[in-house]
Image: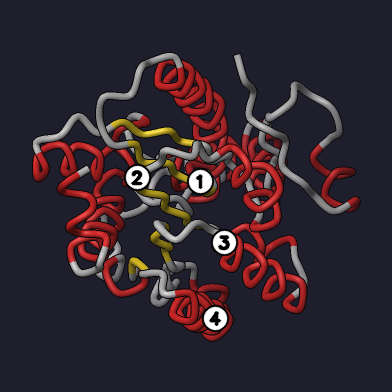
Amino acid sequence: MQRMPAVSRPAWMLALSGVGGRPGAPRRSPIEIVATMGSYVTRTQAAEVSGLRAGPFGRWADGVTAMREDCAAFARHWQAHNDRVLGLAQDGPLWVVLGDSTAQGLGALRPEGGYVGQVLAELRQQTARPWQVLNLSVSGALTRDVTSAQLPRIPADATLVTCGIGVNDILYTSPAKLFADLRALIVALPDNTVLLDLPLPAGCWGLLGRASVPYVARINRTIHQIAAARGLPVAPVSAHFTPPWAGKFASDCFHPSQDGYRDWSRALLAALASTPLRSALRSS
């Protein structure tokens, strides 16, 4: 059984999140670390008396803890799924997914509730073909992880490749390296790839969301520009995953919910329907 590769992290992050664990296990994010510390605080007697335990911070900390458990469960699901797909004789088109926790479907009720599962069901229905998906994504992955560990595992007979990456880089990577890593990845992607741009945090996460919008928009411009130079289509998640936000985020207030992933699915399906890949997808 092949195991997912570990994701890279800077030294300061390894010190905070812990070193070791089984290969391929996703590293904890700053959001998880803060929430874990918060969960200890909210379980004290003082927190019970003050009402902090039952307040928004306590509920958020519990949501992030539950999401961490889902992260491991979803990874096991896709690993078992990939093993089955790789063990089958392919009699239909193969879709290979590259990316991070959003490609894992984290935040949905079940792994198939993410955009990958939703789009797969639609592809099968629209084309009447037995599409299979090989999901090489890893929660917490950075752009450089996709280039070094996921990209080399794409089978030669893949009909479609999709790649959505970059959100984690905002937390862990300097701007200069982030844009260099994006360029290196997009240049190396196969010609049958569709990229996903990043959601814009407009109107969510308060001041942090508003402050990050210009940077995310700049990243998206870079994705679109380099993809255009390569002739690769881009699914505009930023234009589909938009306010009103009610019901579109999971319990950690970070990952999309199953309803939120419907917006992501519409973005990817729209890109597939309006690109030169359309005829190839239907005839594969």
Where does residue 178 sit, x and y in percent of width and height?
70, 70
Q: Is residue 120 left or right of residue 155?
A: left
Q: Nearer the viewer, mark 4 or mark 3?
A: 4
Count the numbered circles shown: 4
Front position in the image: 35 or 281: 281
Query: Which quarter of the figure has residue 241?
Result: bottom left
Q: Earlier in the sequence, mark 2 or mark 3?
A: 2
Residue hosting label 2 = 159
Residue hosting label 1 = 60
Label 3, secondary structure: give it. Answer: helix
Q: What amino acid is at disc 3?
A: Val
Q: Earlier in the sequence, mark 3 or mark 1?
A: 1
Label 1 near label 4: C-beta < 8 Å?
no
Near mark 3 (Cα within 10 A), the count class, few <14, some 14-19 or many ≥20, is many
Q: Is residue 48 above or below residue 272?
A: above
Q: Earlier in the sequence, mark 4 or mark 1?
A: 1
Q: Nearer the viewer, mark 1 or mark 2?
A: 2
Q: What amino acid is at disc 4?
A: Thr
Q: What amino acid is at disc 2?
A: Thr
Label 2, secondary structure: give it. Answer: loop
Near mark 2 (Cα within 10 A), the count class, few <14, some 14-19 or many ≥20, is some
Q: Is residue 220 above or below residue 87?
A: below
Residue drawn at x 79%, y 49% is 9
Front position in the image: 266 or 28: 266
* Inter-mark Cα distance, 1 to 2: 40 Å
